[in-house]
Amino acid sequence: MNAETLELARLQFAVTAGAHFLFVALTLGLATIVACVQLRATVSRDPVRTEMVRFWGQLYVINYAMGILTGLVMELQFGLSWSGLTHFAGNVFGSALAMETLVAFFIESTFLAVWIFGWGRLGPWAHVAVFWVVALTAYASAYWILVANGLMQNPVGTRVDGDTLVVTDLSAVLTNPSAVTAFWHIAGGALLTGGFLVAGVSAYHLYRRSRHGELFTRSLRIGVFTALAGLVLSVVTGGMQFEWLGDVQAMKIAAFEGDSAELDALQAAMSAQFGAGDYTPPSLARAGGVVMLLAFALMLWLLIAGALLASFRRAVLRFRLWHVVLVASIPLPYIAMIAGWVFREVGRQPWVVYEMLTVEDAVSDVSDTVMRASLLTFTAIFGTLIAVTVWLLARHARRDPGTGFLGRVIDERGGQEPSTAVLTFVGR
Amino acid sequence: METLAVVTLAFYVLGYFVLGGADLGTGMMLPFLARNRAERRLVVAAIVPFFLTSEVWLIASAGLLIGFFPALEGELVSGLFPLIVVLLAGWVTRDAGVWFRGRVTGDGVAARSWRAGCDAAICAGSWLAAGAWAWILSGMLGGTFTRVLTDPAVIFAVLAVLVVFGLHGLAFAALRLTGAPQRRAAQGFGAMGEKQAFALTAAALMTLVAAAGSGLELTGSAADPATLAWLVPAALALTPLLMASQVWVWWLFGRRVFAPEDQDNNVLIP
């Protein structure tokens, strides 16, 4: 195998997965907030809450596209660049991906279309139920993806038969702690991401003394308390993972602690067990872990102070320095998420399936020219789309509520059946 | 189990080509169907409620392929690497155009260029994706599965498959649209009814895909029996639920789109 192809394939997957991870984190977090707000809006029939659903819902919709587009490229990249992985672990890995597409993604996208275009066509209770399906299937999707990723970290419930991995205990695969604990950890991270975004955008409008003070006061509080809940959840589950990581991936812990004696000992032990080779993860893993913890510490202080301040209505409305801090903190959860992801995935190197298959043995047999061309293609497309999405998100986040596209139709003269939520969506 | 796995996979693949092929075809025909701003908007609106719910069939197919036949997925996808990259690039471009088109509003030069750019992305993306499919299917029809066919004669096969995609898009547009774009879409089918025309182009596309896929050696490359023993029943149990959600979408949004008389009168729905 060409060493350059391997590095290019890894870079390509990292670019796609990293972009995917950041956008779906917001998708998951915002979906939770929108689902809860819409439920309360439906129960209370409160127009402010209904407008909140529209405002945050449209940011959710704009953000959603990047998750799908990077996700589908990623799914095909397994076969494209990592045919060794699908060959070796396809029995287990592939079935988790198959379940993700059927149980989660298929339903999520179908119901999202119903939610966007069915506004006003469905009754309010049916409409909110549709969004709850969207939100819950998004979590189901995260779970199945983490079953696949958990297998790479800690291949329990399986055994090697010839040159492939087969399932011996399905429930062990589905309850793999590397999947389940990580799922809650990421769910916490997603709430943190969504919470900080909602709080930051609300703070921007309150700073500008928006006439929608009530809407953004409520939103800011929802954002701060959601982020705090997310932080607690991700810290607890992050700590739990550290506890037993020493048993399943001692090398990752040693790399994080930068303990060179331990690293040398593990390197020698792994060389004896698996043959000569470099089994020490790159130092990037440690950097990821450190940045993650720093971002966590910063967010913890911001949120403790924020939770106190949010209890005072005057502070929420008028404390402009805090507003600036909240806007500036929108990127923090993203930094923590990507750093944690780097720690988890770089920390397992050189393995793609831990202690069973190396990335070198998993990469497809394609030339480095082809791999470079595809890397350039995807990087150019995703770079453009990410820039456009971030620009659109910022643009819609700064606008006044009541000016968005969601939940709006174009008036039909003549009383014909409106096909017009669709027309509003496609623009003029 | 293996036979059931093949049948389930084939169901989703054929479903994708009938539904996803239709909106790709309509996207290809966008400049032909729509000659002015109002018409372009109408043609894109014909695709919009369904493009997400149609492409999930392909994502499900890819998921089932990797779940049921993991080794084959690796061989197929890495063998056809350059074409898959083109397919994905076209697909992503098309989707971005559809998703972003209405996100910049107004009548200024910037907003008009934005919409023109998105329409170009929809059309070019549809051609790229359909072209990649046409090339992949042509290779498979000729018995080549794990490498890109580069014989010059392949160009004729690719063009022929593209014609089928285009006709299928026209048949779909004839069913979905009203007014001048609808007449342009329907004119090629002569006196044939709109539903018959769609059934015919769908059947042509399905025959093509079935013929291309029939040469695949699926049975020898399945996942191990323990995996299939739970995955196939799980997929079969879920399928009716997924179909019900699709039928619901068609029932909700299946009516023709038409141009509103007053485009500027936005109304808030409670």
Image: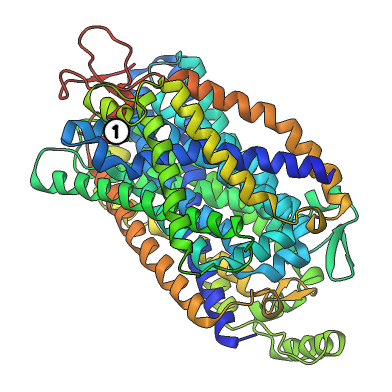
Residue B234 left/right relative to B12: right
Above or below A167: residue A344: below
Q: How is the rendered protein coloured? A: rainbow
Query: Which subunit holds the residue at mark 1?
Result: B
Quadrant (top left, top right, bottom left, bottom right) of the N terminus of chain B? top right
Q: Foreground: B181 or A224?
A: B181
Residue A268 left/right relative to B103: right
Residue type, mark 1 in image? Val
In the orientation shown, which residue stands out farthest toward the left? Answer: B108
Instruction: Tell me the quarter of the picture where residue A47 sits.
Output: top left
Q: Which residue is mark 1?
A: B43
Instruction: Tell me the quarter of the picture where residue A373 sits.
Output: bottom left
User: Residue A80 placed where, x, y %?
Assistant: 59, 66
In the orientation shown, which residue stands out farthest toward the top? Answer: A415
User: Residue B226 placed where, x, y %?
Assistant: 88, 50
User: Residue B84 placed where, x, y %?
Assistant: 52, 61
Q: Foreground: B131 or A307?
A: B131
Q: Foreground: A343 or B88?
A: B88
Q: Secondary structure at mark 1?
A: helix
Above or below B188: residue B55: below
Can you see residue A122? yes
Quadrant (top left, top right, bottom left, bottom right) of the C terminus of chain B? top left
Residue A348 left/right relative to A315: right
- The residue under the point 44% across, 50% down is B160
Can you see residue A295? no
User: Residue B257 placed where, x, y %?
Assistant: 32, 22
Crowd around label 1: few <14 · some 14–19 · many ≥20 (10 Å): many
